[in-house]
């Protein structure tokens, strides 16, 4: 099945700044192919670079994203219960975060770390679950 990409849609791509395969927003298309993208983690804009493995590139449908987001919003509220949101640390690529830690992201708002993998975090926000980079110097 071929996925029809569109400007404003999401796509996994190799980020030239983060040096990792991360979620990006499509900014420009040439025909039916993404040409320019913005990294959802570092906000860097660059030409589209496909991930090394074609199976690694997935685009969520709007319906699937909406269903997942609704479930995650409820989960976020439950996860944040008993946490002191006022003590949330501001997100920075350079900072290290731990599992269960509350953070404040400039774009996504308050979130809670669900998983830590070496230099990546899985964080639940109201906008959905995002993969962020941490501990980069």
Image: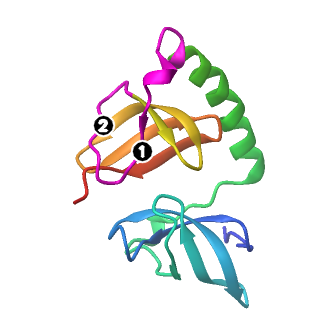
Could you classify mark 1 by the number of other residues whose Cα lies within 10 Å: few (under 14), some (14-19), or many (20 or more)? many
The one nearer the camera, 98 or 69, is 98
Q: Classify mark 1: helix, strand or loop.
A: loop
Q: Is residue 78 above or below residue 41?
A: above
The residue segment tinted magenta is 80-101
Residue at coordinates 42% horizontally, 73% vertically from top-left? 51
Residue under label 1: 91
Q: Is residue 88 above or below residue 94?
A: above
**Pointer 2 or 1: first along the chain:** 1
Residue under label 2: 97
Q: Quadrant of the C terminus?
A: bottom left
Disc 2 to disc 1, C-alpha distance: 9 Å
Residue at coordinates 66% horizontally, 27% vertically from top-left? 73
Please indicate whether residue 32 sits to the left or right of residue 118 in the image. Answer: right
The one nearer the camera, 60 or 94, is 94
Q: Main secondary structure of the magenta part?
A: loop
Q: Is residue 82 above or below residue 46?
A: above
Which residue is the extreme one toward the bottom? Answer: 30
């Amino acid at each position: 099945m071929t996925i029809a990409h569109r400007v404003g849609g999401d796509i996994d791509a190799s980020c030239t700044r983060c040096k990792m395969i991360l979620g990006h927003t499509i900014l420009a298309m040439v025909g039916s192919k993404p040409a320019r993208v913005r990294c959802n983690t570092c906000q860097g804009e660059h030409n589209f670079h496909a991930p090394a493995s074609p199976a690694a590139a997935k685009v969520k449908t709007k319906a699937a994203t909406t269903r997942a987001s609704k479930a995650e919003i409820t989960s976020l509220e439950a996860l944040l219960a008993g946490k002191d949101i006022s003590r949330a640390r501001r997100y920075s690529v350079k900072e290290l975060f731990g599992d269960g830690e509350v953070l404040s992201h400039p774009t996504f708002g308050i979130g809670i770390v669900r998983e830590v993998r070496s230099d990546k975090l899985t964080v639940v926000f109201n906008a959905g679950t995002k993969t962020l980079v941490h501990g980069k110097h």
